[in-house]
Amino acid sequence: MPWSLINLAVSFLAFGVLARISPCNPRQRAFVSRDLADNTLYWFLGVLTFGGLADLYIHTGLGLTLGARASAAVLSGYGMAARLPLALQALLVLVAMDFIQYWLHRLFHGHTLWPFHAIHHSAEELDWTTTYRIHPVNFAVYSAGALALVRLIGFSPAAFLIIGPFNLVIGPLVHANLDWTFGPFRYVLASPVYHRWHHVKDPAIYNRNFAPTFPIFDLMFGTFYMPKGVLPADYGVDGVPGHFIGQLIYPFRIIAGRLGPARKARLPVAAA
């Protein structure tokens, strides 16, 4: 929790100041967006449900709680992956995670799982805090599920610790209200403008730019969208409740509504 609070405070100041200096959408508030209250609740929900496990994993991995034995354990993996140089393992973990999350992200834009992901897209003022606006079901599959799959390959836990600081920064950065495109590197690393296009209301556009970190996957699979000289605006989706509790319930209500007509269609027709 302390590390999470420090990260939150630094992000609030850094991205707030940068949004004043170089905003993508100048009319949007730099520090306190209209969705800040809901996004803060999602952050607390994430810390309560998943943050404790993450802190324990990090502290144990660094040997801060169990000493030398933990330090040895965190460097161990299994199979060929664990025998690679640690820096190479970290890079491969990033690429593997991005590839898996690219396809999971596309899956969440499909009819079945979209109600869960629509919560993330419902923010009408997109800023760095939107990173935390994720339904627990979405998080469990998209983040925890992808992490578990990559971990099964056998990489050393230390490789995951190495990329930890990068992952803490890249999520808030790509959601931040910044007009950064990364110029010639736009195809190498996800930029704020690249990801903000993914959050516009137009379905023809928000069904693009799925890669969380490396746009090369969108280029490979035909989903890259980043027109030069144009900046994204008008974010959100219609139909999602405007309050935290309603948003948590929303996907289940939609799914229940779909099952109702299907259940009625399966009922036998009474004889005349």
Image: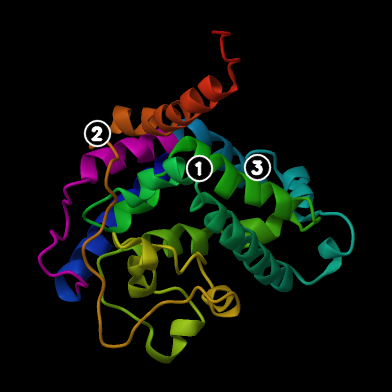
28 part of magenta stretch:
yes
Secondary structure state at the residue bearing disc 1: helix
Disc 2 target residue: 243
**For this view, does 199 lie left or right of residue 170?**
left
**Amino acid type at mark 3:** Thr
Of labels 2 and 3, earlier in sequence is: 3
Check disc 2 and report its element: helix, strand or loop. loop
Q: Quadrant of residue 24?
A: bottom left
Left or right position of 71 against 192: right
Which kind of residue does numbered mark 2 sit on?
His
Eyeballing the image, is 208 above or below 121?
A: below
Q: Which residue is mark 1?
A: 138
Q: Position of residue 73 (x, y in %)?
A: 78, 48
Residue 79 left/right relative to 52: right
> In which quadrant of the rendered image does the N terminus lie?
top left
Q: Which residues are magenta?
A: 23-46
Q: How many marks?
A: 3
Q: Nearer the viewer, residue 168 or 149?
A: 149
Name of the residue lying farthest toward the right:
79
Tell me the residue that label 3 is attached to.
60
Locate residue 125, reporting x and y percent: 21, 55
